[in-house]
Amino acid sequence: MTPTVLGDLRTHLAVHGPLPYRGSPRLLIDTVGAAGLTGRGGAAFPVAGKLAAVAGAGARAVVVANGAEGEPASGKGTLLLRTSPHLVLDGIQLAAEAVNATQAFLCTHHDHMAGRTDTPSRAAASRPGRARHRRRRPDPGRAVPRPPEVSRR
């Protein structure tokens, strides 16, 4: 089955409507908590707990969304970025508003987005404000060295 691409903003807004919770960060955090949304990084940490902790800290916040697909066989993040980039950008924007962040970043893996239509960049450029997606190639000079081989006896 080929997924439907909702890459343009007009189609996205027609299907999903405007962003909810604008100006109500506490309501967003409470709703996320009631829904039981958890992180997908393996520890299943409650997202509302993360948002509330950062919002309550009173410090300058930055939101970083990981679209770099750390699970090689999964492909779910890449698929979501290609088919529904505005849903991802909506989530980033709402998270940033909930924690009063002044900046938000979407990180993607060069290899997974290479040769594609660069949907996240086009989606970001079509949105009002200063949304931009920058895809950077890995810098071989700054690569993290591999750990030494461990002999198994």
Image (cartoon, rainbow, N blue to C red):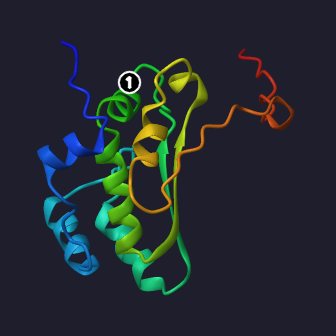
Give the farthest residue toward the bottom. 58
Give the answer, above or below, for where 70 lies relative to 126: above
Q: Quadrant of residue 18?
A: bottom left
State left or right for residue 52 relative to residue 14: right
State left or right for residue 112 relative to residue 126: right
Give the answer, above or below, for where 5 lies relative to 108: above
State the image coordinates of residue 41 (x, y, percent, origin top left). 42, 44
Which residue is at a point 29% across and 54% down the rendered structure image?
38
Which residue is at a point 77% across and 18% down the rendered structure image?
151
- Neighbours of disc 1 within 10 Å: few (<14), some (14-19), many (20+): few
Which residue is at a point 78% across and 30% down the rendered structure image?
147
* Amino acid at circle 1: Ser
Give the answer, above or below, for where 65 lies relative to 72: below
The residue under label 1 is 74
State the image coordinates of residue 97 (x, y, percent, origin top left). 37, 72
The one of 58 and 113 positioned closer to us in this rendering:
113
Q: Quadrant of the C terminus?
A: top right
Give the farthest residue toward the right. 141
Q: Quadrant of residue 8?
A: top left
The one of 85 and 139 positioned closer to us in this rendering:
85
Which residue is at a point 56% across and 22% down the rendered structure image?
114
Element type where label 1 sits in the image: loop
State the image coordinates of residue 23 (x, y, percent, origin top left). 26, 79
